[in-house]
Amino acid sequence: MKSLVARTLGIVATAGIGLAVSAAPAAAALGNTFELATGSVSAYGTYDRMMSIPEHPVAPIRISGTLAVNSTKCGVVQVAYNGPTDGIEWRTFGALCGKGKTNYTTTSNFLFGGFQPQVRLCKGTTVTKAERGTSCDTFTPVAD
């Protein structure tokens, strides 16, 4: 009978010849989904890493999901990108004002230093005020 630790980690010994460990890394267990909320505005979706080949290059990050507003406020979903002088800027790729839901999809490149870009949800009385980023919730992807 295997011990509790061996069963939990998936450790299998074969006749003293070798040892195999099949435990999944913690990041894989968390998945690639996110949920953001600030007040009556929420967003949820997926954050995927993409594969590329030289004949058909694609951006390495794809973000998609749904933006929901449950009031008369406006909400925006933004992704971080490299701004001037190594600063971080925010690009809006999903916006909605008033009650309802809308879908969004975008692609992005890595930030300077190979970091994955953050995604944030912000609210305001107008799209312009929401884009200022004063009331936000931010998703930071797990580092590889």
Image: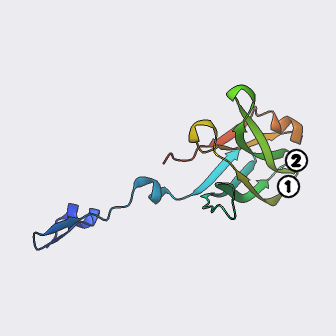
Q: Nearer the viewer, residue 29 or 84?
A: 84
Residue 61 drawn above or below residue 124 = below
Tell me the residue at 63%/52% (across/down).
35
Q: Is mark 1 on a helix, strand or loop?
A: loop
Percent of width and height locating residue 112: 62, 36
Residue designated by label 1: 99
Residue 103, image quadrant? bottom right
Q: Are marks 1 and 2 in contact (CB under 8 Å)?
A: yes
In the visual, does 105 lie left or right of 25? Answer: right
Q: What residue type is labelled 2?
A: Thr
In the image, farthest residue toward the front: 55
Disc 2: CA contacts within 10 A as few (<14), some (14-19) or many (>=20): some
Q: What residue is shown at x 65% (from left), y 61% (from top)? A: 54
Residue picked out by circle 2: 72
At which x and y percent is residue 26? 41, 54
Dot 1: within a 10 Å radius of its alpha carbon, few (fewer than 14), some, or many (20 or more) residues? Answer: some
Residue 91 percent location from the top left of the image: 78, 42
Q: How many marks?
A: 2
Please name the amino acid that badge 1 sits on.
Lys
Find residue 116 and report its image quarter. Answer: top right
Q: Residue at left 75%, top 41%?
A: 122
**Quadrant that contains the N terminus:** bottom left
**Along the viewing direction, whichever of 7 and 83 lies nearer the viewer:** 83
Q: Which residue is drawn at 61% across and 58% down?
A: 48
In the displayed structure, would residue 69 be above or below residue 7? above
In which image quadrant can residue 107 be found? Answer: bottom right
Mark 1 to mark 2 CA distance (whole Å): 6 Å
Q: Earlier in the sequence, mark 1 or mark 2?
A: 2
Name the residue at the left extreme: 16
